[in-house]
Image: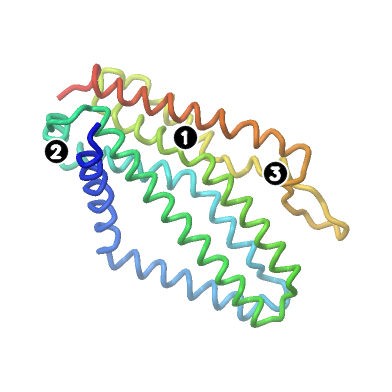
Amino acid sequence: MKSGTFNALYRHEFHMEFRRWLSRKGVWMYVGALVVLALAALTIWGGRGDFKPEYMLYATYAFPYLVFGISYRLVKREWSNGTYGWWLTLPFSRSKLMLAKYAASLAQAGLTLLVYFAAIVLLALYNAALHGTTAEGVRSFGAVAAQYLLVVAAIAPFMLSLGLLAGVLVRSRLKGISPLVWISFGVLGNALNWLNIARSADSNGDYEMSLFSSHSALAFWISFPVIWLLAALMLAGSVQICKKFMTL
């Protein structure tokens, strides 16, 4: 695989979808409204403990579904725009075409996660500066945020592969197994609920995450390479479906 050719395919996939999102005014209005609401909530209720920065981390429960959607859209776009015939007949191997979509969706998902968590950290620092949160409180929040980010990042490769698989099955002779993929999407997309396994009560009776120290959290560290192996196998399966079972 020539790196120049792959890089060109990757840039095409990444920038095309990214430009669409950036050009949508509704997206920026929605993001701006959420930031304003978060700032208002922290300003009004943050000092009394009625609204904690940790609450904003609950939005990450939707991130596995978002990651799935990113890769699924990259493939579905070819069917929706009627360009799948052109895409599949490009003078490149099907594996190269699929890997370019996977790499682009991985970069988009990674960028989205980093921007979101950076915004959460900035909001937490704003809350600390405004209401005099202790350094220990900021450190505790950072530890919790890191654990949420770790779990989302760990399962992202699997959800991306699952999204690509769901996308290619739409136009393949194996589309009869699509319901199994969507069932997996519904069940495995709820991955952040697994964090409840690593929850423990502190001296005040409040629950905190202990993914880095809890004995029960060992299952997470063992499961990560298994998840990545399954992601690689699923990506390879998507490539094979494109090669042998895709219908034009």
Residue at mark 1 to residue at mark 3: CA–CA distance: 20 Å
Residue in the picture at 16% in, 42% down: 81
151 displayed left or right of 6:
right
Identify the image quadrant of the C terminus: top left
Residue at mark 2 to residue at mark 1: CA–CA distance: 27 Å
4 displayed left or right of 195:
left
Mark linked to residue 196: 3
Residue in the picture at 71% in, 46% down: 212
The percent position of residue 112, horizontal first and vertical second, equals: 42, 56
The type of residue carrying mark 3 is Asn
Q: Residues within 10 Å of mark 2 (few under 14, many from 20)?
A: few
Looking at the image, which is closer to me, 23 or 5? 5
10 over 43 or under it: above or below: above
Identify the image quadrant of the N terminus: top left
66 displayed left or right of 11:
right
Mark linked to residue 158: 1
Q: Earlier in the sequence, mark 1 or mark 3?
A: 1
Q: Earlier in the sequence, mark 2 or mark 1?
A: 2
Residue in the picture at 53% in, 35% down: 188
Looking at the image, which is closer to me, 45 or 15? 15
SS label for mark 2: loop
235 displayed left or right of 202:
left
Q: Earlier in the sequence, mark 3 or mark 2?
A: 2
Residue at mark 3 to residue at mark 2: CA–CA distance: 44 Å
Name the residue tied to disc 2: 82
The percent position of residue 178, horizontal first and vertical second, equals: 37, 25
- Disc 3 vs disc 2: Cβ atoms closer than 8 Å? no
Residue 223 lies in quadrant = top right
Q: Residues within 10 Å of mark 1 (few under 14, many from 20)?
A: many
The percent position of residue 36, horizontal first and vertical second, equals: 48, 76
